[in-house]
Image (cartoon, rainbow, N blue to C red):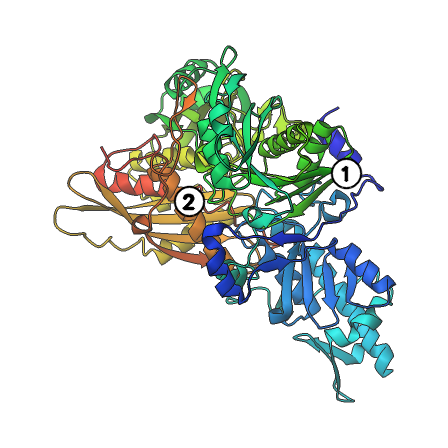
Amino acid sequence: MSLNSKFLKLLRPGRSPVHARSRIEIVNMETDLKRRRFLQGAGGLTLGVGLSPLLKTQRALAAGKAEAFAPNAFLRIGTDGTVTVISKHLEMGQGAYTGLATLAAEELDADWSRVKVEGAPANTKVYANLAFGAQGTGGSTAIANSFEQMRRAGATARAMLVAAAADKWKVPADSITVSNGIVSHAASGRKAGFGELAQAAAKLPAPKDVKLKTPDQYKLIGKQKLARRDTAGKTDGSAIYTQDIKLPGMLVAVAAHPPKFGAKLKSFDAAKAKAIPGVVAIVPFEGTEHSMAGVAVLAKNTWVARQGRDALQVQWDESRAYGKGSEQIFAQYREALKQPGLTARKDGDIAQGLAQPAKLIEAEYSVPYLAHAAMEPMNCLVKLGNGECEVWNGEQWQTVDQFNIAKLLGISPEKVKLNQLYAGGSFGRRANPRSDYLLEAVQIAVGAQKQGLKVPVKLVWTREDDMRGGYYRPAFLHQMKLALDAQGKPRALHVRMAGQSIIKGIGFDALIKDGVDITSVEGMANLPYAIPNLQVELHTPEDVGVPVQWFRSVGSTQNGFAGEGIIDEAAVAAGRDPVAFRRELLTKHPRHAGVLDLAAAKAEWDKPLAAGPAGTKRGRGVAVHEAFGSFVAQVAEVTVQADGSYKVDRIVCAVDCGIAVNPDVIRAQMEGGIGYGLSLALSGAITVKDGVVEQSNFHDYTVLRMNQMPKIEVHIVPSNANPTGVGEPGTPPTAPAVVNALFQATGKRIRTLPIGDKVV
């Protein structure tokens, strides 16, 4: 049975897990304790996570306390007037909490200052992501799949509050208005806050249908300066991450992992580790089919656990480990590309289109493995007992993790309770289809229990563990031929590409069509340009042992670079302006053309680029790309010194993502996506030698520094189309825009990422 079919079983009525949380104490890291005590104005900070929101509300109502009005699974309104939005999507910095709260609060006509957000419990039946049928956050789907759902939740609550007021005041419901959290009847002058009506509204039946606002009626959606719902906590230190939580008796686990993928534990000597004060236990674990084996040191705090881990003397069985390096992998790809691959797209006759061209461009583009490098490394807290498993972490993919943990423990998914906390970034890493670090934590907790330690276990990965822990953006190689006719128009484009599949073997059969992993070819197989003969072929080697996983914008990271690179080469070969060249090929794609025109206009593309200091060269490049239903164009400006060093001075970005629910968040996501894209373009690379990842921390896997960040302008295309995602689409155009700008400045075409410190 595939994982997909098992998900469908989980979605059946009666399969929703009952979610109850223990009251937990938030204990600050020792180095941070004084700061947080000052900020909180108390000797410590305690968070009562309590029962699940709905269960808590139901019990309160049953007891006659009327603490809250819960009209549906997504809203609670307290008797004090506080509106709590239950977010089914993880907040990992992308603004999901703010976006979902905006949708509900808009239809509710709530006072934004009284709105707060909590993470939803794990419940696939109630909180499934409507884009892919399982509970989880990814693919820039949070706002897109929740746009109507959250608005209906707010509208339903509003209708019930109005009905309660109408009944209380004995007036027609249609004579009542709601604004900024106040229910009013103008004729009689009566007013009531949400809290005053909560108890009465809770006794009313929810309406079966509600009328939603039209865009001209919006008061919150589309407004520029709504305060983000997660800003205050992240500013004053009260936001709760996995590392902040401590349960009674909890031990911290830091594990030793094999240096090569596929290696197993052979033997270990723990004498030196056990001699360190504070080390409580040494727990070996076998790993799973898709997670590493290792040895964990359990201690009373992270520092001691890490010292103990470093003191272990471990021998690894590498007889079945993967032993090749990046150079050998790319050589394997080049050999594969000598033969036709599986066809991902075929328009026209590629052989005829390439025959006797006026000009022929042949190019090879390549990108390396990439680490997600989220600011918060992988971690989670596990508590086992009474045939159940409870987890606290930045939970990104509830359904998958519930299923995988339940399978490992031999229990039903309902017995796996997941508490969703904030996550310090992810970029896809926490949505691991193998649940790798979660299963590692569970295995360690099981091993501890076998040693008589029936205590919660918090697994903490160091930065080095995270960097070398596998599951990277796949390395890819593109070989392309583009033919131009006598008028300089593209007549044919033939693309052969090779790289590992993210999807194969994880049960997501719908994402593989005719053997082609559609995430491998997205951004290339749907290239929008009018090229009459276009063929895209894919080779997917299955014997490369480096674990891979989706990454911010997935296949578009590599395909946006290669696709926009070859199109730029075509414009140069045709002697055409790069913007005008693209514009003529996008007549059937108005939204691509729209962002292209907007970015070019705001960048003043039609005016000469201002000269730089003496001895420097300046250039300007453009790229346009669609990812996850959103359209983004970017114009990059660069300055190159005489020695080849360079600076990205400015990036002008235009985005069309449908209705701009939170324009300020959209701008932030474009800025963040561009910064992330610059990191990948300038220096991002995971390299493997003899099966060992060579990078370990930010000193050798460098990310963008503050002094490298260019001036960024973001312009949003006005739209009444349903919203699409913004977390990922800002990244793909960045690298090609910068590379194209460097070509304009130097005449040197860069086809391999990262660029490095100098253009050579």
Can you see residue 530?
no
Work out which residue is located at the far left of the displayed protein and give it.
614
Residue 694: which numbered mark, if any?
A: none
**Which residue lies at the image location 66% right of the left edge and 36% below the top edge?**
401
Q: Quadrant of residue 515?
A: top right
Left or right of 517, for residue 154: right
Which image quadrant: the C terminus? Answer: top left
Q: Nearer the viewer, residue 687 or 215?
A: 687
Q: Nearer the viewer, residue 559 or 352?
A: 559
Can you see residue 231?
yes
For label 1, count other residues whose C-alpha is less than 10 Å away and answer few (under 14), some (14-19) or many (20+): some
Q: How many marks are shown on the rendered structure?
A: 2
Position of residue 548 measured from the top left corner of the image (x, y, whole percent): 52, 28
Position of residue 415 measured from the top left corner of the image (x, y, whole percent): 77, 38
Determine whether 358 is above or below 13 in the image: above
For label 2, count other residues whose C-alpha is less than 10 Å away and answer few (under 14), some (14-19) or many (20+): many
Per the image, the residue denoted by label 2 is 676
Determine whether 19 is above or below 681 in the image: below
Left or right of 299, for residue 495: left
Determine whether 183 is above or below 314 in the image: below
Cα distance between the residues tagged 2 and 1: 38 Å
Amino acid marked by disc 2: Tyr
Per the image, the residue denoted by label 1 is 415
